Structures are given as C-alpha cells and as structure tokens.
Amino acid sequence: MHELNYEIVGDDMQAVKFNLASGQNIRAEAGAMIYMDSTIKMDTHTGGGLIKGLKRTITGESFFITSFTCEGAAGTVSFSGPYPGKITPIKVTPERSFLCQKDAYLCSTEGVEVSVGFTKRFGAGLFGGEGFILQKIHGEGKVFLHSGGTMIKLELAPGEEVRVDTGCLVAFSESVHYDIKFVGGVKSALFGGEGLFFATLTGPGKVILQTLPFSRLADKVIAASKFGQEETRRGRRI
C-alpha cells in the first residue's frame, strides 16, 4: 500500500494537491476539483447507494460524491474549497471519529464515510448556529476539512471547557461533549453582537475553529452591496 502523497498550497486561498500512485483513490465533494492529469479517472456516484446519498444531502453535502482513481503509474489531482480559507488534514480511525459543520468536508481517502451525526441534546440543535444535524466523519483514513479564514486547533483535557461562537466551530472529536447555552444577561444578549447563544465544548478531545465563518463574510458583502446601491441612487438624485 502506497503512502498518501499530498501537498497543501497557498496561504489564504488554499488548495490540496495529491500525487497518486497506481490504484490510489481520493473521494471529493462534487465541484471541488481544480485540475487532474490524464491518468486520473473520474467517477461520480452515490458513495454506497441511495440511502448514503440521501444522508449526505441532509447534512448539507451534495447527493453525489466523486471518486478520482489513478489508472497510470502516477497522476495528480487537486481540490479547493468554495470560498477563501484554510485546509487541514485529520486522521480518522474506528476509535476516533469527528462531528463537523456542514460544508466542512472537502475530500478524503477511500474508507472514510460522511453520514448524519445528531447533536447530543435537542436544545443544542434548536439554537445552535449550525442546526440540529451535523456531519459525522468516521471510518478509517484521512479527511481534509475546509474552513473560512484561519484555523485554530485546540486539544481539550478531560473536563476542560471552551465557549465558542457557534459559527466559528468547524469540527470536534466525538468524545467532546457539545451543548448550546444562552449568553446570559439582557444587555449581553441584545447588544453584545455575538448572538443569543454560544457553543460549549467539554473535553477530552480535539476542537477545530475558524476565524471567518462564511456567514459573516456573506453578511459583510451584502451590507456593503446595499450601501453601494444606496450611494448610487443618491448620486442619481443629485
């Protein structure tokens, strides 16, 4: 079995490039591919049948998944996320699975599965910024996650707790306890600018955060666009 050969390139708009040996396979979210060699065969499928395809759509991914297999002596294929950010690899084993926000999954080696992962409490899903259903990344292999801005990685000790803006949460080990709590205080809730709820994560396990959730970026773009349109209308009146 050949060891996976890959390189993460770029700074603020990263891509991951795989140099595959004969027979090696990479699975990716539909639409993530940038380029590939002529020795790479692309095959789009449900990744294990109708049910698995439907489970992925529930988590926010596409119904189909694309496999890229090297059919020559060697071949290169490259992927990137849908918006500026970082890419990080994490190792998944039968004893070490992860829960991720929707759209975090970019690509993975064969043997890694993406399915539905429910939050542990209904309140967490009802008020959490990422909804009641999260992606569960499990199996065995390597998965590459994409996030907005820069990634912050935390390793929580047993009982150690961290409070996080719900939109900044990318992924966490399934061993981490996840809950949503009210910010507390009328002034903090209404004028704090951080929303009404934050996520609390209690170790042990790994937590991955992002500094620029896509929702924040989109809000700024929309706000700027509306301001620009208003300025244009004022200019026309003058």
Image (cartoon, rainbow, N blue to C red):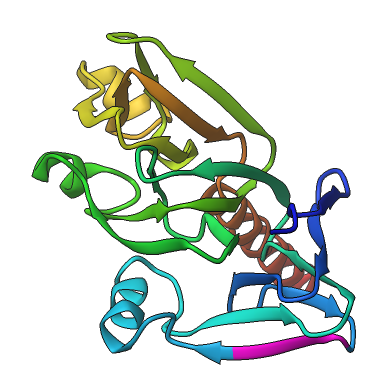
Q: Is residue 207 above or below residue 121?
A: above
Span shown in magenta: 39-43
Horizontally, residue 11 falls left or right of residue 153, namely right
As displayed, is residue 121 above or below residue 1? above
Name the quadrant of the N terminus.
bottom right
Q: Position of residue 214 (x, y in %)?
A: 57, 53
Q: Main secondary structure of the magenta part?
A: strand
Q: Residue 229: x and y, percent?
A: 68, 69
Quarter of the figure with residue 224: bottom right
Foreground pick, 233 / 21? 21
Q: Is the residue 170 above or below the residue 134 in the image?
A: above
Question: With respect to residue 153, does 76 lie above or below?
Answer: below
The quarter holding residue 122 reads top left
Residue positioned 85% across, 78% down in the render: 35
- Viewport quadrant of the C terminus: bottom right
Whether residue 71 sits left or right of residue 59 in the image: it is right
Residue 222, magenta (yes or no): no
Residue at the limit of the structure toward the front, as seen here: 1
* Residue located 26% across and 22% down the image: 183
User: Residue 76 appears at what percent x and percent y?
Assistant: 87, 71
Residue 7 relative to residue 119: left or right: right
User: Where is residue 170 drawn, in percent x and y?
Assistant: 48, 42
Q: Residue at x 11, y 40 (%)?
A: 121
Q: Nearer the viewer, residue 235 or 191?
A: 191
